[in-house]
Amino acid sequence: MKFRLAFTALMAGSLGAAHAQQTAKPEDTEVWEPVPKVVAPGRTSGEAPSDALVLFNGKSLDEWVTADDRTAPAKWTVTGGILTVNKGTGNIETKRLFTNYQLHLEWRVPANISGTGQARGNSGVFLASLGKGDLGYELQILDAYNNKTYVNGMAGSIYKQLIPLANPARKAGEWQAYDVIWTAPTFAADGAMATPARATVLFNGVVVENNVSLLGPTQYIGKPSYQRHGPAPIKLQAHGDKSEPLSFRNIWVRELPAVGQ
Ligand code: MG
């Protein structure tokens, strides 16, 4: 016992406080309560208005590329008017870049979904993609019907930042709708953040994020912080879990002027 104590003291002394800070874990930024109330949504329509730019019309992926290689076409599967994640080919994102916009998107967790928590129907919409992998601001997509997880990581959350105000999820096998109003962050000449990104999110017609300010791009481990960027693609996530892949349909966007103009 004496030896163990002495050894522990030696380790602590030699490695110091810097080592303790380097042991940050994903769990450190998970929030589990309070759990948003369950709300049964009404009927929703995702029909595109006349001035919308249609990003997926059920037929082609012409508006999309592979996120990790923007010279490569998107390789997800299009059948029967539906877009399905092809996990092996990674995230896809729009060819076009956006700043402020209104986005509509419908997603469906397959009825035969398996897994639990974050490994059950995980995808996401990166409201501004900032590069390869999962760089960007993620609005989480996940089975949220009787599927317990940390509440700042459930469907309708701005991942690991903002808990949804309610849980209007439909069950797996049914189509779900996101309507998002995104206001990009602005930056001063020296690169410092001048105004944060803001998002309003309706999930199946129910407001789950009400003009919230983001702390920065999504961080899986640790705290977010801003770095200057300009217009960016919208990205869809091919999450690496083993559960059955999600599908999407009816994706459109309307560009918006900067707030106040
Ligand atoms: Mg996700």
Image: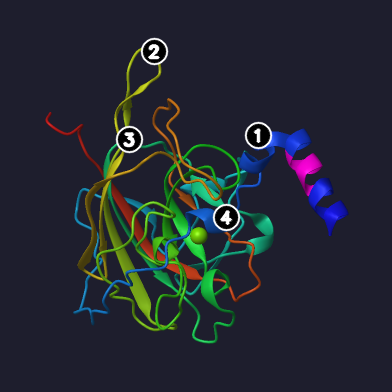
The numbered dot on residue 99 is: 3
- Residue 63 is left or right of residue 102, and the answer is right
Mark before the other along the chain sequence, 1 or 2: 1
Mark before the other along the chain sequence, 1 or 3: 1
Out of 242 and 37, give the one closest to the viewer.
37
Out of 159 and 78, give the one closest to the viewer.
159
Mark before the other along the chain sequence, 2 or 4: 4
Mark 2 sits on what residue? 190
Marks 2,3: beta carbons within 8 A: no
Marks 3,4: beta carbons within 8 A: no
Mark before the other along the chain sequence, 1 or 4: 1
> Measuring 45% from the left and 77% from the top, which residue is drawn there?
148
Judged by depth in the image, the label closer to the viewer, 3 or 4, is 4
On the question of residue 97 being in view, the answer is yes
Marks 1,3: beta carbons within 8 A: no
Q: Is residue 9 magenta?
A: yes
Mark 1 sits on what residue? 18
* Residue lying farthest to the right in this orientation: 3
Mark 4 sits on what residue? 26
* Res 36 → quadrant: bottom left
